Amino acid sequence: MKFVVTTGVIAIAMVVATLHLTAINVSAAIPSYWKTEVVLCNETSSRCMGAHIGCPEECPSTRRPNAEGKICHVECDHPICNAGCRTRKPNCDAPGSACYDPRFVGGDGRVFYFHGKSNEVFTLVSDPNFQINGHFIGHRPVARPRDFTWIQSFGILFDSHKFTLEATKAATWDNEVDHMKFTYDGQDLSVEEGSLSAWSSQDITVERVSSKNSVIVTIKNKAEILVNVVPVTKEDDRVHKYQIPEHDCFVHLEVQFRFFHLSPNVEGVLGKTYQPDFENAVAKPGKAMPVMGGEDEYRTSDLLSAECGACIFSKAEEQSSKQGMGTNFPTLDCTRGAAAAAGYGIVCRK
């Protein structure tokens, strides 16, 4: 009997020791960054579906920025399922950006300019299920042959919805004033001032990145758009010789687009650079200022018009009709490697 009791005690001690060792091993096996926020990739079509991905210690949150203004970002469709740090404001040197007067970086990573024309609207992206138009403002100094132009607003058509974001005019710039105006389906949209405040519907979210003049617009399964509102500064005016009048600082947008599920036939000033076989004939190495043409091809009558010479957007009812006939728009083949800096540019789906 004594032997049995002793054996039992030994057995219990062994179990306790085993549990203790197991706990130690599990704790040691958990990466340090998993002690921060963990993101679950739950999109059924993503490469990392079902994966729990931990944020790095230097940017532990997906919503609250660190001291450098960066947050944790997880790209669930990336071949390597991991997280990185990124800013929540446009990177004007990354693919998908449209900044300055206006300077684009295409889906192929190459820089080009598209001047357009002051007070006209041009289609930036046109795909069967959504379209983005941009309204250009500008100024032409005496004896100059063309306008200096900037993107002042954009309008988005998707499904049966319409969304606009506008940089409001100002004679002088004031950082304490919000210069953003929104509409959704023809109604003014109010997004409360304050960092991290947001408005959302079933298919679109508008989130403020800072208290004023900076937002992220997310259209479900279609696009993510990082937007700043900025003026033409006195230094910009001096360097580029814009000769800006005193009564207008030409408030405009800095934008960076990230697209999902683009068709291979995507069109638009920026959109066509995401075509699988696109070759940028103007953005050649060594060319100081490659200018893209196509004003007539991409000019449209209104910020929310679906019509232009090369536009391929279909309204919701037209898409339903086409789907009923078996029409299918495949996603892009990313084998050509148009990688996007900081996670921007083409996003592949399988």
Image (cartoon, helix red, strand yellow):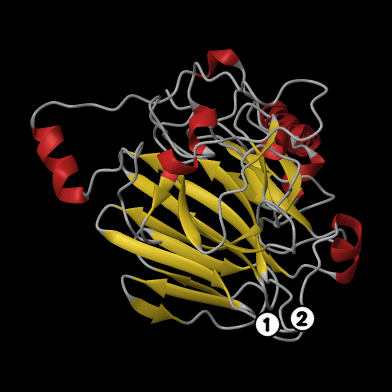
Residue extending furthest toward the top: 335
Q: Is residue 219 above or below residue 250?
A: above
Q: Residue at x 34, y 63 (%)?
A: 162
Q: Do the residues bearing badges 1 and 2 touch, measured as CB atoms within 8 Å?
A: yes
Q: Quadrant of the C terminus?
A: top left
- The percent position of residue 171, horizontal first and vertical second, equals 72, 84
State the residue in front, 225 or 166.
Answer: 166
Element carrying mark 1: loop
The residue tagged 2 is 173
- The percent position of residue 290, horizontal first and vertical second, equals 71, 32
Image-quadrant location for residue 249 = bottom right
Q: Is residue 54 above or below residue 278?
A: below
Q: Residue at x 14, y 42 (%)?
A: 320
Q: Is residue 206 above or below residue 88?
A: below
Image-quadrant location for residue 245 = bottom right
Q: Residue at x 48, y 24 (%)?
A: 275
Q: Kindly identify the amino acid type of the residue bearing the numbered disc 1.
A: Ala
The answer to whether residue 213 is seen in the rendering is: yes
The residue tagged 1 is 170
State the residue in front, 343 or 90.
Answer: 90
Residue extending furthest toward the front: 143
